[in-house]
Image: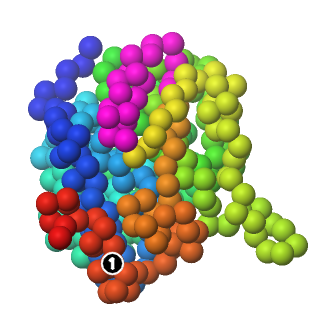
Amino acid sequence: MATATGLHRDSSSVPELESLSRQTRRLILESIHKAGAGHIGGPLSVTDILVSLYFTELRIDPQDPSNEHRDRLILSKGHSSIALYTVLALRGYFPVEELDTFDQIDSRLQGHPDLTALPGLDMSTGSLGQGLSPGIGMALGARLKGDEFHTWVILGDGELQEGQIWEAAFVAARYKLANLTAIVDANNLPQFGWPHESGHTRDTPIDDPAAKFRAFGWNVIEIDGHDHSALQDAWQQAKAYTEGPTCIVAHTVKGKGVSYMEGDYLWHAQVPTQDDLDKAGSELADPEERS
């Protein structure tokens, strides 16, 4: 079995993780405000998932981001890149100040992740529905090499409408890839729903994703995707299951953390004003900072 010298997991407590989540959300909003473009709703819904993975679960070394034995993470919903960049910065992969360059033409932090530009990225993503397939390749590669790293793929519930996801789900179950975990950021609110004579509906992207993954032979865990204790338990349950791949359906809220953004599809990709930032900042402050 290959060893993972130099790799380690962080051991942040739940209160520390909750504070990191608030800080991440503040930085996301500030980065989008400065860039004048970008997505907000999806990055805010996936924040706790990313914070939990990077600060409690992933065996990584920010000083050695290409270590071949590191755990892999693919953000298939690549339009939520600013959430991933922010967590990478807080974890020590690059200076937090670099977030100010988000989406600028010469920046390493493009609107969708580019693994050739930024250390710490395991896959370039953005064309929805295509993240699970390379995750399968990574998991199979680990098995063939006798390596112990785990592969995690974060999916948006909207991209579950893509057929490639279900072709990949079938293959992963067929090969019994216990070293692969998919996490569905199930915020139930797409930018656009189904065509209708009155315009586009806001229907749930896909009915009961948990049942569908079970039908494809996956182990399935359903949790509150904003509960840090539940997230950590889910990571352990997924790794403990040895019969095949696991799908964690994390029920989340689009725009989580900012009351006037939560559950509002208009904040899918809307740029916050300074007034918006001021209002959000008071809601996202740590308890001891509030007055």
The structure's colour scheme is rainbow
- State whether residue 241 is above or below residue 257: above
- State whether residue 285 is above or below residue 34: above
Q: Mark 1 points at which residue?
A: 279
- Residue at x-position 31% and y-position 21%: 148
Q: Does the magenta stretch include residue 222?
A: no
Residue 282 falls in image quadrant: bottom left
Residue 69 falls in image quadrant: top left
Nearest the viewer among 23 and 213 is 23
Residue 28 falls in image quadrant: bottom left
Find the residue positioned furthest to the right: 197
- State whether residue 129 is above or below residue 218: below
Q: Which amino acid does label 1 sit on?
A: Lys
Q: Give the image location of residue 64, x and y in percent.
A: 15, 43
Q: Is residue 112 left or right of residue 58?
A: right
Q: How many residues crowd around disc 1 within 10 Å: few (fewer than 14), some, or many (20 or more)?
A: some
The reply to whether residue 176 is in sight is yes
| Quarter of the image that includes the N terminus | top left
Find the residue positioned furthest to the bottom: 274
Nearest the viewer among 258 and 69 is 258
Image: magenta residue range? 227-246
Nearest the viewer among 210 and 4 is 210
- Residue at x-position 27% and y-position 59%: 22
- Residue at x-position 47% and y-position 35%: 223
Q: Give the image location of residue 71, x and y in percent.
A: 30, 34
Q: Give the image location of residue 264, x and y in percent.
A: 55, 68
- State whether residue 240 is above or below residue 216: above
Q: Is residue 189 left or right of residue 36?
A: right
The overriding secondary structure of the stretch rendered in magenta is: helix
